[in-house]
Image (cartoon, grey):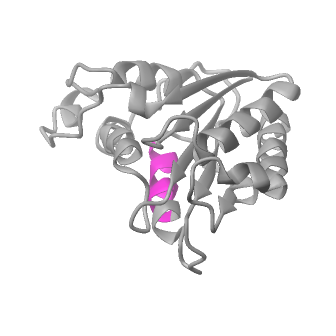
Amino acid sequence: MIVIGISGSPRRDGNTETLLDRALAGAEAAGANVEKFVLCDYEISGCIECNDCFESGTCTIGDDMDAIYEAIERADRIVIASPIFFMGLTSQMKAIIDRCQCYWALKYILKEKFPREENAPSRQGSFIGVGGTHGENLFDGAMKTLKYFFDAIEAKPREDLYVLVRGVDDKGEIEARKDALEDAFESGRKLAESA
């Protein structure tokens, strides 16, 4: 079982990454091999809508996204973690999602399967969202985007394991939210253990 975590926070070692670390610790405790990608450490261009992927099913931009593609393709479970900016995902996270247009093209234009081994386990995706406000609809935009992202990469969204934390903004503030830290750990553990 390979579980990858992708942090879209532009801030290192902040609330989002802390929760992601807890989720990955939970997955590791369940016996999974885990890897973490922190997008602010990568140089990733946005999609340029060249539509080359409509012909090939792959992206022709050459940058650090190649490492993310490779990880997404071999992952059995994917945990997306992002703070909420303007009721959506960060630009760092949205850039990699937009660059997964190639997987959408592979599935819906070229009618081909996602590049995975035939006997690979079914894929699942989860989400850790952190917002500074308490708005009722705080996570709606992010969750809508993730629904279609997970569809494109052939991963079942596990909304029952999403960890959505409101009212956390200042760096390190999450350390006082023991409930959220425990929820993240359990989410990662259950994600790794699920069939």
Residue occupying the point 45% across, 67% down: 141
Q: Residue furthest bottom?
A: 136
Left or right of 103 in this view: 189: right
The quadrant the N terminus occupies is top right
The quadrant the C terminus occupies is top right
Q: Nearer the viewer, residue 147 or 39?
A: 39
Residue 50 sits inside the magenta stretch: no
Q: Residue furthest left?
A: 50
Vertical comparison of 55 with 19: above or below: above
**Residue 162: quarter of image:** bottom right
Residue occupying the point 40% across, 33% down: 40
Q: Nearer the viewer, residue 184 or 158?
A: 184
Residue occupying the point 59% across, 81% down: 136
Query: What stretch of residues is rendered in magenta?
Result: 144-152
By secondary structure, the bulk of the magenta-drawn segment is best described as: helix
Vertical comparison of 179 with 190: above or below: below
